[in-house]
Amino acid sequence: MIKKGDFVELDYTGRIKDDKVVFDTTLEQTAKDNNIHNPGFRYKPVIICVGEKHVVKGLDDALIGKKPGKYTIEVKAENAFGRKTAELLKLIPMRLFEKDNIKPFVGLEVNVDGTLGVVRSVSGGRVIVDFNHPLASRDLVYDVEIKRIVTDPLEKIKALLELLGIPFKDIDVIDDKAIITTQRRMVEGAAKGVEEHIKRLIGLKSVEFRTEEEVKKELEKEVKEEKQEEKKKEKKEKEKEKEGKEKKEEKEAEHEKSKEEKKDL
């Protein structure tokens, strides 16, 4: 049975309980059938770590104790995207929109300081923007197929990087150490946080991020050291061969000398 900390692969489709509207799915045909298909999205089963809030809390909690198979799981609003709160209704001066050449209207989606909201009313010089999640106060239903429990550390690392939106080129896992190759260097603090996150969830002793350039330089260094080692080995073999030849010549010389001495006698 599935327990907290397990990695599982699953397909799911999320619907609003009241009107059965599909708002999220990992299945491409389901997305097309419900007119929410995104051509830029790669539809496929997702791998998550149970108990790490990679899905809404109600669904996350419901996975514990389950076995691979198909389930229908109801999730109350408070365990999904929360209840709507008046604190997230913000009054924003019209001049801030005018500064960016935006003419607000009811229903317009806006991004204010990195937070998405929807314009609820426009009156004179004031605009009320709702920053509650669009699915706040909605009970949900998830149709879930738990395909398998994932045990391969490499698969787990790939899944975590994808969930965190971190692009990578290659991953090497040797014993309890993972080396993740990226195209560009990550910000040091961010890299450290991700490394600790991966170590904690997968149980690795060491996780290291390296850029392609760093890996290339390291390989070049290893090749150079190998060539130097080969040269040293060749030199030692030649010296050994020379030493053996000299010893052989010495023995032959001693043998000839001994023969001459015997003749003299």
Image (cartoon, helix red, strand yellow):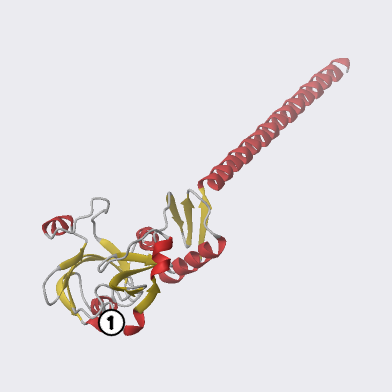
Give x and y (percent) for residue 164. Answer: 39, 63
User: How many residues crowd around disc 1 within 10 Å: few (fewer than 14), some, or many (20 or more)?
Assistant: some
Residue 114 visible, this orientation:
no
Give x and y (percent) for residue 220. Answer: 58, 40
Residue located 24% across and 57% down the image: 44
Query: Which part of the image, by quadrant, shows the N terminus?
Result: bottom left
Q: Which residue is mark 1?
A: 84
**Total number of numbered discs in the rendering:** 1
Q: Is residue 147 left or right of residue 232?
A: left
Name above or below for residue 130 compared with residue 154.
below
Q: Secondary structure at mark 1?
A: loop
Residue 247 visible, this orientation:
yes
Give x and y (percent) for residue 98. Answer: 40, 63
Query: Which part of the image, by quadrant, shows the C terminus?
Result: top right
Q: Nearer the viewer, residue 152 or 110?
A: 110
Name above or below for residue 245 compared with residue 162.
above
Q: Nearer the viewer, residue 63 or 41?
A: 41
Q: Nearer the viewer, residue 14 or 143?
A: 14
Residue located 73% across and 27% down the image: 242
Quarter where residue 54 is shown: bottom left
Name above or below for residue 96 compared with residue 185.
below
Q: Is residue 226 left or right of residue 193?
A: right
Give x and y (percent) for residue 36. Answer: 18, 59
Q: Nearer the viewer, residue 110 or 232?
A: 110
Q: Is residue 161 left or right of residue 36?
A: right
Q: What kind of residue is marked 1? A: Lys
Q: Is residue 165 left or right of residue 80?
A: right
> Please, which residue is most extreme toward the front here?
124
Quarter where residue 65 is shown: bottom left
